Image: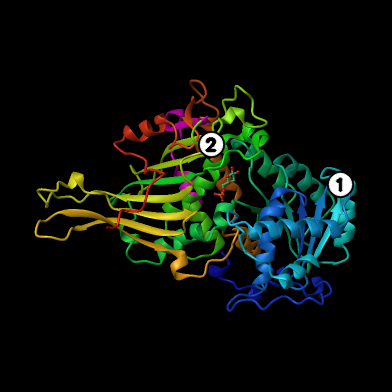
């Protein structure tokens, strides 16, 4: 969260920006950076997985956006490592083409319209392709030679690869001496994508492996939800407004719903999804991160460790989930298309869940007894990532003809995707001589107040990593406590695996998920819903 960082880039310790690591300036100069923001220190970004989807869809658009904003240093270099020989010019051309496609596609998060040629040229001039297998010494020897051209330079190793390569790449980097931050030398950082392990044991093993070659402050574990402005804004809504914080506690809050519903299916990722499932894919990472932002205590400052400590306390306070707290579903043929089992690379008898719902309790002073209902799924009725905080009913039946039970509950909804904003449901008197209560909604959309950019969410994360600001990255302990909270669901100590219930593609999810809330007297907010009707 660079804007809230206590230490501006220019004031960071010298180790982050040694003068010696600046590579020769390119004739193409970076555009001026926005007021109050400075370019990140010069560095070489080494992307393992240069030919992959992540590089194309997210990293390049993010680097391009950072270049448009003038937030990258002229001395920046980008080395793309991938198996298969390829000319740098071909790699650049491929990236340019896909960038243009995404920019023109209104459905893409990167719908920038026409590309700014100056910014693209600036990025393109810094791209260099290097052919190499991720598990052979030769690749790392070649890489070392390349990096030695900028002695003492800052280097970020970005692992945009399948998780099976995380360990071998880190090991090779370590053994080749590439993770050593020498005296007067620049930083060496590793960015690791999710999935970070598949359960508690594997996450612990991965952490231990990485930390035997690098220090914790060199490791940047990404959860891309934290790169979304609307997610970062949860803390702004909570801690920059006197209105909300006093009621942000068990005395006033009845329940919280956290939803990440998608209309897409597995989109050609059948192989990955078969082994992962909706629960592992989304719950102990993205949804827990949202829960952490909603539930954390106010930190003393926006210092990375202060924020991460408070979030860590929440993950630690989550009551371990049991199979009884979760519902799994799998989409079947329905109005939105074929069933999951008919998707490519999916076993005809697959029992992998494409939907997961959970009831979570945070066992601490502020949240005791308040249920947090989490749900996520593919091929649902609507795309909707949001957090709804429902307040308790008013304490007294003042309006006799309108029993308080019938009043619409007050709900604050923080809309993350695809709508960006907040809304608040509350009650007023309807016009006319009779005292009647009517439900209304007050809402705010980012687009009405701010110029929204085609931001893919990785801009902040990359920029922060270059600045050395770890606020939005996950610490080893939090990853492990999150997996720990769900371990009994993944490896039930008693009973069998969690049953998987069918739901029609394009529906609201399995009926059993409704029952999970109904037993507490609650109901999911419909995915497909209109704003409160205005007359
Ligand atoms: C990814 C999951 O981490 O997040 C995907 O692997 C999911 O399955 C995606 O579709 C959702 O992210 P977003 O930003 O599109 O809501």
Q: Which residues are magenta?
A: 312-333
Q: Secondary structure at mark 1?
A: loop
Q: Is residue 215 something one can see in this rendering?
A: no
Q: What label does residue 505 carry, if any?
A: none
Give the left or right position of residue 409, taking residue 272 as reference: left
Q: Nearer the viewer, mark 2 or mark 1?
A: 1
Of the 4 image quadrants, the one containing the C terminus is: bottom left
Q: Is residue 422 something one can see in this rendering?
A: yes
- What number of labels is visible? 2
Residue nearest the viewer, comparing 515 with 384: 384
Crowdedness near tag 2: few (<14), some (14–19) or many (≥20) residues, C-alpha within 10 Å: many
Crowdedness near tag 1: few (<14), some (14–19) or many (≥20) residues, C-alpha within 10 Å: few
Q: Magenta segment: does it hold 444?
A: no
Residue nearest the viewer, comparing 413 with 39: 413
The residue located at (90%, 48%) in the rendering is 138
Q: Position of residue 121 (x, y in %)?
A: 77, 69
Quadrant assignment, res 449 = bottom left
Residue 290 vertical position relative to residue 246 in the rendered view, above or below: above
Give the left or right position of residue 185, taking residue 311 as reference: right
Chosen colour scheme: rainbow
Report which residue position mark 2 lands on: 279
The span from disc 2 to disc 1 (Cα, nearest Å) is: 34 Å
Of the 4 image quadrants, the one containing the N terminus is: bottom right
Report which residue position mark 1 lands on: 84
Q: Position of residue 127 (x, y in %)?
A: 80, 62
The residue located at (60%, 76%) in the rendering is 34
Give the left or right position of residue 373, taking residue 459 as reference: left
């Amino acid at each position: 969260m660079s804007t809230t960082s206590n230490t501006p880039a220019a004031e960071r310790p010298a180790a982050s920006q040694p003068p010696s690591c600046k590579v020769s300036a390119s004739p193409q100069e970076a555009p001026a950076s926005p007021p109050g923001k400075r370019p990140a220190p010069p560095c070489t970004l080494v992307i393992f997985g240069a030919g992959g989807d992540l590089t194309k869809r997210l990293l390049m658009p993010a680097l391009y956006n950072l270049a448009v904003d003038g937030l990258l240093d002229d001395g920046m270099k980008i080395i793309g490592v991938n198996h298969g020989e390829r000319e740098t010019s071909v790699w650049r051309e491929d990236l340019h083409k896909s960038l243009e496609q995404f920019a023109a596609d209104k459905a893409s998060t990167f719908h920038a319209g026409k590309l700014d040629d100056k910014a693209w040229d600036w990025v393109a001039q810094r791209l260099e392709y290097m052919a190499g297998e991720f598990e052979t010494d030769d690749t790392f020897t070649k890489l070392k030679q390349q990096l030695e051209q900028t002695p003492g330079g800052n280097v970020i190793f970005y692992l945009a690869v399948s998780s099976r390569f995380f360990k071998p790449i880190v090991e090779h980097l370590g053994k080749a001496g590439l993770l050593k931050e020498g005296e007067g030398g620049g930083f060496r950082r590793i960015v690791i994508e999710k999935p970070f392990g598949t359960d508690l044991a594997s996450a612990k093993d991965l952490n231990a492996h990485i930390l035997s070659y690098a220090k914790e402050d060199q490791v940047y574990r990404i959860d891309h939800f934290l790169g979304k402005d609307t997610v970062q804004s949860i803390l702004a809504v909570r801690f920059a407004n006197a209105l909300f914080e006093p009621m942000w506690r068990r005395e006033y809050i009845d329940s919280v719903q956290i939803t990440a519903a998608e209309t897409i299916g597995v989109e050609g990722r059948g192989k990955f999804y078969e082994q992962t499932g909706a629960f592992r894919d989304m719950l102990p990472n993205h949804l827990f991160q949202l829960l952490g932002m909603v539930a954390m205590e106010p930190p003393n400052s926006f210092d990375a460790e202060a924020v991460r400590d408070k979030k860590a306390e929440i993950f630690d306070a989550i009551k371990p989930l049991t199979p009884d707290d979760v519902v799994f579903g799998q989409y079947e043929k329905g109005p939105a298309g074929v069933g999951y089992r008919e998707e490519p690379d999916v076993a005809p008898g697959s029992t992998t869940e494409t939907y997961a719902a959970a009831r979570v309790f945070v066992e601490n002073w502020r949240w005791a007894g308040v249920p947090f209902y989490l749900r996520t799924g593919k091929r649902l009725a609507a795309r909707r990532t949001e957090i709804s905080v429902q307040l308790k009913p008013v304490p007294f039946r003042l309006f006799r003809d309108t029993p308080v039970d019938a009043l619409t509950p007050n709900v604050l909804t923080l809309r993350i995707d695809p709508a960006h904003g907040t809304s608040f449901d509350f009650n007023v008197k309807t016009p006319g001589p009779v005292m009647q209560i009517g439900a209304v909604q007050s809402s705010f959309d980012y687009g009405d107040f701010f110029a929204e950019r085609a931001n893919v969410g990785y801009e902040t994360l990359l920029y922060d990593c270059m600045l050395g600001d770890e606020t939005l990255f996950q610490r080893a302990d939090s990853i492990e406590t999150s997996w720990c909270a769900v371990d009994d669901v993944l490896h039930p100590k008693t009973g069998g695996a969690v049953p998987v219930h069918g739901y029609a593609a394009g529906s609201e999810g399995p009926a059993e998920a409704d029952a999970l809330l109904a037993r507490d007297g609650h109901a999911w907010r419909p995915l497909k819903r209109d704003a409160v009707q205005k007359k």
